[in-house]
Amino acid sequence: MRQSQLFPKTKKDTPKDAQAINHKLLVRGGFIDQLMAGSWTILPLGWRVISKINQVIREEMNATGAQELLMPLMHPKEIWNETGRWDSAAEVMYKLKDTREKEFALSFTHEEIVLDLVRKHLESYSDLPIKVYHFSTKFRNEPRATSGILRGREFLMKDLYSVHETQEDFWKYYEQVSDAYLKVFNRLGFKIIMTEAAGGVFTKNLTREYQVIAPVGEDTVYVCNKCQTGFNKEVFKGTIGDKCPKCGRGTVNENRAIEVGNIFPFDTYYSEKMKVYFTDKAGVKKPVWFGSYGIGITRILGSIVEIFHDDKGIIWPKEVAPFQVHLLQIGNDKKIVSAALKLYQKLNDKGVEVLYDDRTDKTPGEKFMDADLIGIPLRIVVSERSLAKDCVEIKQRNKVKSELVKTSKILSKIV
Ligand code: ATP
Ligand code: MG
């Protein structure tokens, strides 16, 4: 991609109302744009990152045997009345009426929708288990949406739902998804604290949360200094320095954290309400065991920035970086332009994703500043100075020192 054609360009000034680091850096870098409080456009650079986050999640969800689909975002009132959530979850739901006075809700989650789908297609135990997920938009009437893209009123989530014949099969899969979540977050570069928490409008069971330590986080978690077990504030009624209730050896520290994922065991609660039954081997009708598993996609985008940045800008982990290489053409001499262009084409041919700063109206200083702000892991500079030595200069975003590499050796160095 030629940077001269990238929409939009970076910004020098931070938005006036921005408090959170992710808000400032993602807006200035041209990754996201705010329409209104809690509502964001994911711009082309941001979308490249989101697509990569989604791909990591997709691979790990598929590895558990789950299948991807896509469910609607506008739901009829009747479905939500079956579980009573039209009223009990009214605070978070956006509701609307069409011109014929028919009432709908915008998706804040999909348990009811997926169970309606399952009951239409489920007959006997041989149809189970069913594990389906999608990446889609959720709408929630959040009272405070001020921490950049971490809390939206409209945001992207990956939600997986699983339906099982027996309690044992359900819990086995629940643990399998939990392991898959740890793999996802590990690949994204997060150090995850897993905590038990209360399920809110979703369930009376304890749920499992996946938390990333960060000062901007809205959650408080206690973490044992010996066994690293995490406890959510709502569940652990203690204070800093208390003995760890799990291992009994360490003491707990208090941390601010961002919840990036959450998994819910629902038993047969929703399936009984929605009459999702199947016939078992003995011919007996039974309700299915059901669970749901969420990951906040746009929240992850913001969390990565909260964790991986310095005072100059973002430092993307390789797995989710919008491009692998940022190629800077410093100077507009014919010789420099043709060397940079040649390298750009060579890297493209090898399948390396390159953002090529081909702009002729920017100073070297402006180009270096933009490269640090955008945060691509590897920077390659083609300049008069480097070409004089038949070299290009390479530097990793998270390192201070750069290195001169012979132009002929550059491919073997990075591919
Ligand atoms: P929170 O306590 O932060 O409101 P939640 O418990 O309501 O989160 P879930 O319903 O479990 O969240 O949703 C699954 C995941 O979706 C969360 O773990 C989080 O990563 C993400 N998420 C939830 N609400 C939002 C939001 N308003 N904006 C962005 N991401 C969100
Ligand atoms: Mg919430």
Image (cartoon, helix red, strand yellow):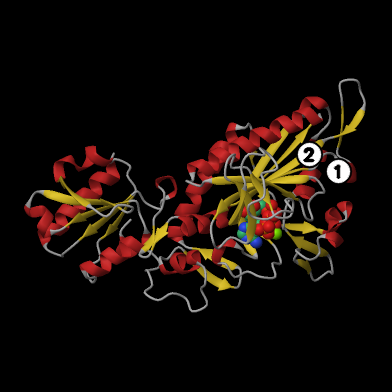
The answer to whether one can see residue 136 in this image is no
- Quarter the C terminus occupies: top left
Task: Classify 169 as above or below 209.
Answer: above
Q: Amino acid at mark 2?
A: Phe
What is the x, y in percent for residue 95? Answer: 78, 66
Name which of mark 1 and mark 2 comes first in the sequence: 1
Q: Nearer the viewer, residue 99 or 78?
A: 78
Give the residue at x 57% y 45%: 225
Looking at the rendered structure, the secondary structure element under dot 1 is helix
Note whether 401 is above or below 370 in the view shown.
above
Q: Mark 2 = which residue?
A: 290
- Displayed-image quarter of ligand 1: bottom right
Q: What SS does tag 2 mark?
A: strand
Between 239 and 140, the residue placed more toward the observer is 239
Mark 2: is the Cβ under 8 angstroms from ligand 1?
no
Question: Where 305 sits versus 171, above or below?
Answer: below
Amino acid type, residue under disc 1 in the picture: Tyr
Measure the alpha-carbon separation of dots 1 and 2: 8 Å
Q: Which residue is mark 1?
A: 269
Q: Residues within 10 Å of mark 1 (few under 14, many from 20)?
A: some
Tell me what residue is drawn at x 57 percent, y 67 percent. 147
Which quarter of the figure has residue 388?
A: bottom left
Q: Say which mark, if any, is on residue 257.
A: none
The reply, left or right, for residue 386 in relation to residue 350 is left
Q: Position of residue 117 (x, y in %)?
A: 77, 43
| x and y, in percent, of residue 4 in the image | 30, 65
In the image, taking residue 81 as reference, residue 291 lies left or right, namely left
Percent of width and height locating residue 345: 24, 48
Residue 8 visible in rendering = yes
